Amino acid sequence: MQPPLADIDYLPQLPRDRTPAIGCIGAGFIVADCHLVAYQRAGFNALAIASRDPAKARRVADQRQVPRVYETYQQLLCDPDIQIVDIGVPPDIQLEVIREVVRHGDHIRGVLAQKPLGVNLAEAVEAVQLCADAGITLAVNQNMRYDQSVRGCKSVLDRGYLGEPVLASIDMRAIPHWMPWQQRQGWVTLRIMSIHHLDTFRFWFGEPLRVFASVRPDPRTSARFAHEDGICVYILEYADGLRATSCDDVWAGPEIAGTEPDIGIRWRVEGTDGLARGTIGWPDYPQPTPSTLDFATNRAPGQWFQPRWNEVWFPDAFVGTMAQLLCALEDNREPEISGRDNLHTMALVDACYRSAKEHRAVELAELLEEHEIRC
């Protein structure tokens, strides 16, 4: 057979029209160094920016060639040229911003919100309903879905190279840079990093039946603020027998104290007809390190296929999260990562917290039914 490399989709679909005006709310790292860099590369129209620190917004605007700067995000929302609002604020402020956004449905057509979509599932449900009532299309920035190896693995699965999935795993040993707002919430890993992996499992395999999670504090971060979800281990059970598991370890050993480091994120999917494995380049940021994908299939015995690319998760994946919203608007359809779809990811995160607290497996349906979310 011909090596199945050319038909591996790892790049996002791009909109035909890249001119809709984007207004960015927030000027922190994720907007300044990820969103706006990606939008420049893709030719998207980042027209305006606002931040709680106007001077910072002006610096970012100068750096990233954003034409308009507003003193407040409320002023930005009143700009009739803005069609897309890109929200880059902490999760405990996001719902407040969305409540203001929906007052401007006369010209605002779409919202790209950060993950997590609020501080819990209840806030996410409210955000989705607010946008639906205002006729505004809501998408969520679950950017790991646009990591090139994650997207490549989905393509391999869809083409049947692995057969029926049997076992999947993600192993994260990384030390993120924590944000001040995390201390307000007492969060470390589940809503910050694990949410990526839970959403990736949903992207690859669909909805699990239940999850069992176990957590403990991260010793390093415990010295800074109290939390429960430092190191998280969880298992997703699927109706067809598939098991998906992740170990999300932000301790990763006493590397900062001088121990030889072993940092990285690795994933693996085993099927009845093949095997795929990969790495995520993010822990090397700002060094641009592409993620990787290797796979073997019974259709080509004795061979490993190893597609490679130059794109990286940060910042190139952020082209995809905005592109899926722009494509949805021009084709009058739901975004790939719609707010409504993301409710299931938020439900999984809440299920993990409940499972860890109550020491039991928690059905996804339990959370969906409590919040009257129809499957």
Image (tube, grey):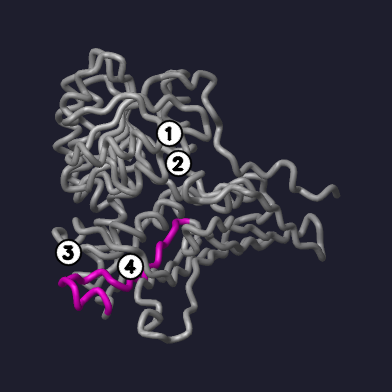
Q: Earlier in the sequence, mark 2 or mark 3?
A: 3
Cβ atoms under marks 2 and 1 closer than 8 Å = yes
Residue interval drawn in magenta = 220-239
- Kind of residue at disc 1: Met
Q: Is residue 218 magenta?
A: no
The spot of residue 152 in percent (x, y) is: 61, 49
Residue annotated with mark 2:
318
Q: Alpha-carbon distance for marks 4 and 2?
A: 31 Å
Residue drawn at x 59%, y 55% as measured from the top left: 290
Q: Alpha-carbon distance for marks 2 and 3?
A: 27 Å
Question: Does dot 4 land on a helix, a strand or a loop?
Answer: strand
Q: Alpha-carbon distance for marks 2 and 1?
A: 6 Å
The spot of residue 363 in percent (x, y) is: 30, 58
Q: Residue furthest bottom?
A: 259
Residue drawn at x 19%, y 73% as measured from the top left: 224
Q: Nearer the viewer, residue 355 or 28?
A: 28
Q: Nearer the viewer, residue 100 or 362?
A: 100
Graded by Cα atoms within 10 Å as few (under 14), some (14 to 19) or many (20 or more), the crowding at tag 2 reads: many
Question: Does dot 3 land on a helix, a strand or a loop?
Answer: loop
Q: Earlier in the sequence, mark 4 or mark 3?
A: 3
Question: Does dot 2 land on a helix, a strand or a loop?
Answer: helix
Q: Alpha-carbon distance for marks 1 and 4?
A: 33 Å
Residue 212, numbered label: 4
